[in-house]
């Protein structure tokens, strides 16, 4: 990359799904955009998270699904072909080659600059190239930080020296270790514990508190029961205190007095902000960025007119699809401001990411799956809402019983009694991911419970759980 200065309407730091979407929105509306990336175009989701993890999980999920239906069960006699599973994962990452993503940027009219970007002044970004050179870019209208996050590695004695896996190393693995010790109990921990169990690893989880914190309690309970039934050892209320390597094995001291051994350790204890973004240049502290509803970065509550942050960088709703949603809102707001248009940033406005707070959709691709939209019962109560919670056994719905013999699942509906609208929905069970969108529509549109009675689910499908929840809630009187 040549040195010197260059001007663009918008400069985006980070070419993951969030940065790509934001740049695309502004270019579509006639602005110029440059996007800066020091790794693979497509980001964490494409190569080290959403895509490869779900590709890795799917074969084992399908095998168990077949074995859960009499008549199909008798035909499934072999184990997974591990090499084929890993090859299929590789196909979804294009073997960690971003050529197709780069071609898409070019076709969209977005200029790619390889290197590490940092804010270096007012509307200014300095790019350090892989060769060590530097180039200064100036944005006429906006700079957007879309750098995602990175795995948090606890400061445990000996842990870094043991070279533990994060999600990145786990999802690039060429083979499954004989034994795997998972530190953590969140989404990444639960999903990858199941994936490597399917690949033949002996898996132990150290879980300081409950599984899947932040979800309804039934989610962690049912997922934990299923993992244990499949052979995962879950040690609850236990934390690692020190790690060392001995004779090729990782030895982990625990605060319950035991020492565990494993061929590999997977650390899945959360995420932290990407460092080195130059925020100190603007007098901002390093860390998660606080933003307004159009994703402008706030400094002591006041927006920095030209600086935006979307996706994990603002930590509002650290999910790929929510980050892309933020990117669309931010890109459209940037274009509106640049072109002299009006900005609609009120609740549910065109340029506001309101769903982050009220209707975020989350799916955990464990087996059983967890699909959640909006608030948990606890979060709704903490927000001061007067709610009624309705639970239903998903396994008793005809569509679920046909779907799998002995289907086990649960559904929860959280209703705001003051407005008679649903503010939270959670489903747990095999293949419930596709139920999430109906819940998202009901919650985002604030459909009155009385009107939902007219959305009649087809029989026999798992969607019939909507009717059962409404019946349990009680039909409003005329």
Image (tube, rainbow, N blue to C red):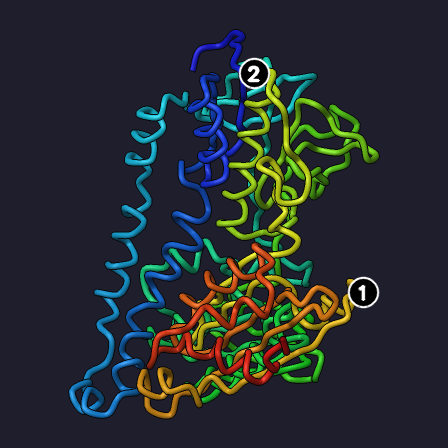
Q: Position of residue 455 (x, y in %)?
A: 45, 68
Q: Position of residue 69 (x, y in %)?
A: 26, 88
Q: Which disc, if any, is residue 339?
A: 2
Q: Which disc, if any, is residue 384?
A: 1
Q: Please report the residue visible at 42 percent of the width from the left and 24 percent of the height from the top.
A: 28
**Circle 1 Cα neighbour tier, 10 Å, few/some/many (<14 / 14–19 / ≥20):** few
Whether 411 is drawn above or below 344: the answer is below
Q: Which disc, if any, is residue 160?
A: none
Toward the viewer: 423 or 122?
Answer: 423
Q: Position of residue 65 (x, y in %)?
A: 30, 80
Toward the viewer: 393 or 24?
Answer: 393
The residue sitting at the left extreme is: 75
Q: Please report the residue visible at 34 percent of the width from the left and 64 percent of the height from the top.
A: 56
Viewport quadrant of the N terminus: top left
Q: Name the secondary structure under disc 1.
A: loop
Residue 379 figure quarter: bottom right
Q: Please report the residue visible at 32 percent of the width from the left and 31 percent of the height from the top.
A: 104
Q: Please report the residue visible at 59 percent of the width from the left and 29 percent of the height from the top.
A: 333
User: In the image, 360: left or right of 52?
Assistant: right
User: In the image, 218: left or right of 430?
Assistant: right
């Amino acid at each position: 990359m040549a040195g010197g200065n260059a001007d663009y309407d918008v400069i985006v730091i980070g070419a993951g799904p969030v940065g790509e979407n934001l740049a695309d929105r502004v270019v579509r509306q006639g602005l110029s955009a440059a996007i800066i990336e020091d790794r693979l175009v497509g980001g964490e989701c494409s190569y080290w998270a959403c895509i490869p993890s779900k590709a890795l999980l799917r074969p084992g999920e399908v095998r168990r699904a077949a074995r859960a239906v009499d008549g199909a069960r008798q035909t499934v006699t072999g184990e997974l072909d591990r090499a084929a599973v890993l090859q299929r994962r590789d196909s979804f990452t294009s073997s960690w080659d971003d050529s197709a993503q780069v071609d898409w940027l070019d076709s969209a009219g977005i200029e790619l600059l390889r290197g590490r970007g940092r804010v270096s002044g007012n509307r200014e970004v300095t790019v350090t190239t892989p060769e060590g050179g530097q180039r200064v870019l100036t944005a006429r209208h906006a700079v957007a930080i879309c750098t995602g996050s990175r795995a948090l590695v606890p400061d445990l004695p000996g842990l870094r020296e043991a070279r533990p896996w994060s999600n990145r190393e786990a999802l690039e693995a060429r083979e499954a270790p004989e034994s795997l010790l998972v530190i953590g109990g969140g989404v990444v921990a639960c999903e990858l514990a199941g994936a490597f169990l399917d690949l033949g690893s002996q898996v132990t989880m150290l879980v300081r508190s409950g599984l899947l914190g932040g979800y309804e309690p039934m989610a962690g309970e049912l997922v934990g029961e299923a993992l244990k039934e499949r052979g995962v050892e879950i040690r609850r209320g236990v934390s690692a205190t020190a790690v060392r390597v001995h004779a090729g094995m990782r030895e982990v001291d625990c605060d319950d007095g035991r020492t565990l051994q494993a061929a590999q350790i997977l650390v899945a204890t959360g995420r932290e902000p990407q460092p080195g973004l130059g925020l100190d240049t603007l007098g901002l502290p390093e860390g998660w960025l606080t933003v307004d509803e159009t994703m402008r970065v706030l400094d002591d509550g006041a927006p920095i007119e030209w600086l935006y942050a979307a996706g994990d960088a603002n930590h509002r709703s650290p999910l790929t699809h929510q980050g892309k949603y933020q990117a669309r809102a931010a890109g459209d707001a940037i274009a509106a401001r640049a072109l002299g248009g009006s900005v609609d940033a009120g609740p549910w406005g065109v340029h506001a990411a309101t769903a982050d707070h009220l209707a975020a959709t989350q799916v955990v691709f464990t087996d059983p799956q967890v699909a959640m939209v909006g608030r948990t019962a606890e979060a709704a109560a903490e927000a001061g809402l007067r709610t009624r919670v309705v639970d239903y056994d998903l396994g008793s719905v005809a569509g679920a019983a046909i779907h799998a013999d002995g289907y086990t699942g649960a559904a929860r509906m959280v209703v705001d009694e003051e407005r008679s609208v649903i503010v939270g929905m959670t489903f747990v069970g095999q293949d419930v991911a596709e139920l999430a969108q109906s819940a998202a529509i009901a919650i985002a549109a604030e459909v009155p419970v009385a009107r939902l009675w007219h959305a009649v689910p087809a029989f026999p499908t798992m969607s019939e759980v909507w009717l059962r929840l409404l019946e349990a809630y009680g039909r409003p009187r005329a």
